[in-house]
Amino acid sequence: DMISRLFSNLPGFAYRCKYDENWTMQFMSDSCKMTTGYLPEELINNKLIAYGNIIHEDDRDNVSQAIADSLKSHDHFEIEYRIITKEGEIRWVWERGICIRTNSKDPIAVEGYITDIHQHKTSQFQKIESDQRYHYLVDLSPDIIFVLDSNGKIIDYKSDKSDLYYQESDLSNKNIFEILPSEVVKSTKIYLEKTLKTHSMQIFNYSLDISGKGTCYFEARMVESAPKEVTVIIRDITIQRMMELDLIKAKDQAEESNRLKSAFLANMSHEIRTPMNAIMGFSNLLLRKSDEQERSKYVKLITKSSEYLLHLINDVLLYSRLQSEEIPIKLSVIELDVFIQNLYDTFKMTGIKENINFYKWISSDCKKLSIMGDHEKIWEILTILTSNALKYTESGEVKIGCKTKNNRIHFYVEDTGIGVPDNEKNKIYDRFYRAVNVQSTNTGGSGLGLSIAKELVDLMKGDIEVWSTEGKGSCFNFSIPLIVAESESIEAPLNTEMPLKMKDMIVLIAEDDAYNYMYLYELMKDCVARIDHALNGQEAIIFESKNHYDLILMDIKMPIMNGNEAIKQIKVGNPDVPIIVQTAYAQSEEKEETMKAGADAYLVKPIDQNELKKVISSICHVDSCNND
Ligand code: ADP
């Protein structure tokens, strides 16, 4: 019983059990109650429960395996496993033992010692877990972390390779002030001192120019993590900073665009009222005055103002269209000398200021040259540039022309007008923008022309530039890649019919609007033999089936049956009758649809008499009527 006494002083218990699957206990020292909660007599011979059954289910195989291994190796085994105590609690135990054999070497028993290690085991787990958690946290953080002493010596750090904006790869025991770029050293020193002095967190920002990355922005947070020691977490905030800067820029732009829009509206109201006043005022005077000379002066002023209004409306419509849709590029053959000549003639017709010498110049390489280009867009751009040149020039010259250079075709418009101030050369392409020097003059404008031109140039992958000296003049130049057109050998088919005289023509006008009809009637009544009037597409078809017409003028938007439908049906029965469409839709898709329906020509309202005559003579092969 000395042995029993000795054992009772130990924290664990000694045992001997059978080498069977229950580890049937044969002997257990008294202290087994402290570890397992069971009295020895409850376990011995499996009286209440077998020892094998109080081993945690998940650990039973491990225990058997360890004992089997030790049997093989003739050595002691040492294992840690869990048991379920009598009170039902899980408890970690440590066991050391050895197998006892018979003479024939078969195992008959196991003897050993088992003790409670629960507390030790769980505190060890807690530590491993909390250490790991801390490491995960640090690893997961995208930030750079330094632990520094009060002199700036690096005690510990965490940084991805990609974060290292310094040469050294191992930073421990180096001084941070030797590593940081000089521009940051000063502020870091100040904040280090401040953190240790105030014992409170300091936050500061700095930026660095990093080769290959440009300017990067950082935010540093510094805390006193131990006496005379700080931890600083540095975060790369470049992306946020960039977003912030972009936002500020966008806000400024939005404000500027808002300001321009208000200025535009104020300007527009002026731009619309001025010609409207002229039109209404002079129309009233027309009614009252009988002097022919005066009246013709008024009519000219009314015409001029109307043209101006139309131009303004076209600009606004085109601009809003450019903003809202993708506009396709349509290439066609452009004969440069004809093109420039037409542009020149168009402006010449509108009347040029007396003191301006307006002329065209086509370089020798462009004469007889045909290119592939978007006729409509190039025309629109040159129209904008030319009307600006004529508008902003009081006297001297305005020259339009083209030349080829470096495989590009250059169109230019040069003037001797007021010029563009140097610091505004880029701004004039902004929508609604008007330079300071024109604002003080009386020249009207919406500030949309050049922004339209620029968008059209961009659509064609072209360039637009201006050279200008304020007070001396400007030269606007736009260029697009040169694509020379294959020479067209197909000549226009010879007209074998006897040429018709316009005077003998019988004409049908399909037009639902009374004023528009009256206008067309006035334009044509003295030139042709007879004019019939159909009020819609269906009437036009009926008229056409009962009469012979040399020409049909067809409106598109009409009630009952629209113009396109009527054209299709008329052309089925009479493919040769020439049809000219007149429409208020100024969009090229409309034109395409109409031409597909079978129309021979297309005119946009308001219709110009000269243009109408030109078109008639070309599609009807007649001599035009010269009664102006
Ligand atoms: P608008 O002529 O209707 O004002 P634009 O967009 O066509 O608008 O032109 C923008 C500005 O560019 C004009 O207001 C003017 O200040 C300047 N500008 C354009 N063309 C010329 C030119 N040929 N000479 C001098 N200034 C010009």
Image: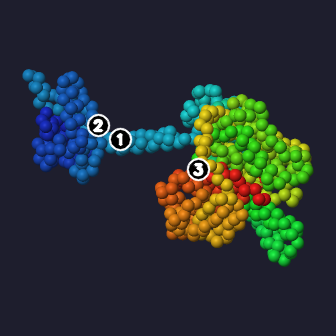
Mark 1 in CB contact with mark 2 (< 8 angstroms): yes
Whether residue 615 is visible here, answered yes or no, is: no
Q: Which residue is mark 3?
A: 326
Front in this rendered view, residue 382 or 65: 382
Q: CA distance from mark 1 to mark 3?
A: 73 Å
Left or right: where does residue 524 sit relative to residue 99?
Answer: right
Mark 1 residue crowding within 10 angstroms, few (<14) / some (14–19) / many (20+): some
Dot 3 falls on a residue whose secondary structure is loop
Quadrant in the picture for residue 112: top left
Question: Residue visible at 78% across and 63% down?
Answer: 303
Q: Which residue is mark 2?
A: 80
Dot 2 falls on a residue whose secondary structure is strand
- Mark 1 or 3, nearer chain start: 1
Q: Is residue 404 above or below residue 542?
A: above
Kindly identify the amino acid type of the residue bearing the numbered disc 1.
Lys
Dot 1 falls on a residue whose secondary structure is helix
Image quadrant where one finds the C terminus: bottom right
Residue that protrudes farthest toward the bottom in the picture:
288
Q: Which residue is mark 1?
A: 121
